[in-house]
Image (cartoon, helix red, strand yellow):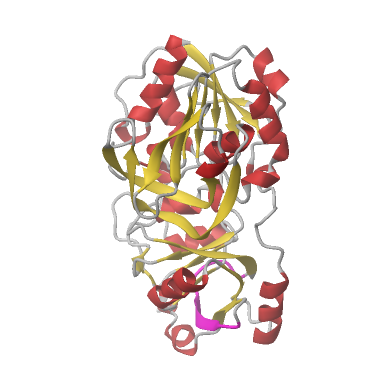
Amino acid sequence: MQKWRWREKREKTAFLALEDGSILRGHSVGANCDALGEVVFNTGMTGYEEILTDPSYNGQIVTMTYTEIGNTGINDADVESRGVFLNGFIVHEMNEPRNWRSECSLSDYLRKNDIPAIAGIDTRALTVRLRTAGTLKAFLCVTGQVSEADALAKAGAWEGLDGQDYAKKVTCPEPFAWDADGQRTQTWGIADELPETHAKVVAYDFGIKWNILRGLRLQGFDVTVVPAETPAADVLAMKPDGVFLSNGPADPAAVTYAIDSIRDLIGKVPLMGICLGHQLLGLALGGKTYRLKFGHHGCNHPVMDLTTQVVEITSQNHNFAVDADTLEPSKVEVTHINLNDNTVEGLQHKREPLFCVQYHPEAAPGPHDASYLFTRFRELIEKA
């Protein structure tokens, strides 16, 4: 049968060229196009639909450490944004769907969205390499039109993600109201009845995920999403009761306009940030960020809430972290830490109504360990 493509699997005509000089060979299971990107690994056993449609992965080629991917296919209810944003996809074995919710196969979905993918890779060996050497730039070749030598040169010459503003690439082109009819929030029974809206929240889209917007709507917020470069004055003119700072890709220090806007919002309206929004808020508060060796990507990261001593199982996707030593302790306190490496996972201001977390409470890996954070934001707004 054509779909099994036994010859291509044996011949391994596709390859991944890493900047360290390594060549990993496999076969194409996605679109017939090549791509540059930063290779990271994700430790989730499932959730590839959300990974593909998470704008925070823009610029990255994602390696799934779990060996069997594609079993549940793709369905529209599980996507997290308006499109597919990662640069490429790496799996050990790509499977045909065997699930009643599937609307198309993972391979067909990747081809439809022009995302190259490679299978037949020893993904666990690649993961060990990335943990040892750190995140690596790479060229993924599936077309057969680039030599291995040229691919290695392209990988080495690529500018990478450091110092790059990718929020501009993934943000919405213009403001929009989230889910006026409630259909997106109530997807496959997430809520029987939505609460009445009682407060207005403006959400900055640095790469926002739909489930974050669902979480805000379920707290009774009327949410308006605005592009990343929206000035603080324009947001304040909308008279919001609170402002949300979303997740997003690449280097937070490069998103200077957002840092300036957030600094202008502090003290004027309650703020909540997630992931990139957390990092940007840390920078606006005078802190600094730094690159992690291989980042945090997965849905099994233990985080302790220092205010309650409760441990949460969290979903994460980031390559940078806030440096706690650069924050002013008389103004800002660390509220959450990662129990794997003690990196900062949450902040709050001691006087102003704002807080942020590095992880993704909306992804529900716990499954509901961190859902209290949306309630905390509502209570912060009500108190303010």
Could you tell me which residue is drawn at 40 percent across and 12 percent down? 196
Occupied quadrant, residue 243: top right
Could you tell me which residue is drawn at 47 percent across and 75 percent down? 129
Residue 292 in view, yes or no: yes
Could you tell me which residue is drawn at 39 percent across and 43 percent down? 337
Q: Position of 227 compared to 292: left or right?
A: right
Q: Is residue 113 above or below residue 271?
A: below
Of the pair 78 and 62, the residue shown nearer to us? 62
Q: Position of 189 compared to 82: left or right?
A: left
Labels in figure, total: 0
Of the pair 6 and 66, the residue shown nearer to us? 66
Could you tell me which residue is drawn at 54 percent across and 66 percent down? 135
Of the pair 78 and 228, the residue shown nearer to us? 228
Check the image and name the residue furthest to the front: 330
Q: Position of residue 263 (x, y in %)?
A: 66, 27
Q: Position of residue 262 (x, y in %)?
A: 64, 28
Occupied quadrant, residue 45: bottom left
Q: Is residue 346 magenta?
A: no
**Quadrant of the image for the N terminus?**
bottom left
Q: Position of 315 compared to 332: left or right?
A: left
Q: Position of residue 288 (x, y in %)?
A: 61, 44
In the image, which residues are magenta? 21-32
Q: Is residue 228 above or below residue 62?
A: above
Q: Position of residue 214 (x, y in %)?
A: 43, 30
Residue 197 in view, yes or no: no
Q: Is residue 119 above or below residue 6?
A: above
